[in-house]
Amino acid sequence: MGVMRLHIAADHAGYELKQLLVTYLEAGGHDVTDHGALEYDEVDDYPGFCFTAGEAVAADPDSLGIVLGGSGNGEQIAANKVKGVRAALAWSVQTAMLGRAHNNANVVALGSRQHGLVEATEIIEAFISTPFSGEERHVRRIEQIAKYEAR
């Protein structure tokens, strides 16, 4: 796996996993920017963290993002509101790889309450190590989404 610039964010539900992933990913040589939460707050709200991480990814096309919550659903929805973000909810290594290979997803959403640390780490590794296939049919579909988004 090559070294990547990564933007990571989580609410209270994903906070503990985020802290572990930051340490793990930095130990692997990745350049990780933590967009919060910077402390555990059981009543914090995920959208702002996801917007900030998504904006950082959209501004740096060579980077990838990771957004974490209890299920990952809300985090994916929030990140996808940022123009230029294609956030994929990954619940397995295969869905993480497909999100990158077929959808050129630049953000992965993961539910920390759905996975143990080992499985979560494997899913994140699969996402950041899988390249976009560049196949014409996938490029065409992504362009259709981008065109709609620009309306």
Image: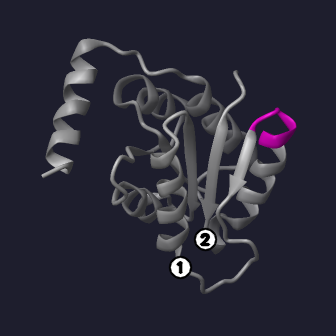
Give residue 105's position: percent from left, percent from top. Answer: 42, 37
Q: Which residues are magenta?
A: 25-30
Of the numbered discs 2 and 1, the one sitting upstream in the chain is 2
Mark 2 and mark 1: span between their CA atoms? 6 Å
Q: Are marks 2 and 1 in contact (CB under 8 Å)?
A: yes
Residue nearest the viewer, comparing 126 with 119? 126
What's the residue at 62%, 50% (across, down)?
A: 7
Residue 139 vs 61, above or below: the answer is above
Give residue 25's position: percent from left, percent from top. Answer: 77, 40
What's the residue at 56%, 65% (across, down)?
A: 70
Residue nearest the viewer, comparing 71 with 99? 99
Residue under numbered circle 1: 45
Residue type, mark 1 in image: Asp
Residue 50 vs 140, above or below: the answer is below
Residue under numbered circle 2: 11
Secondary-structure class at tag 1:
loop
Give residue 104's position: percent from left, percent from top. Answer: 40, 30
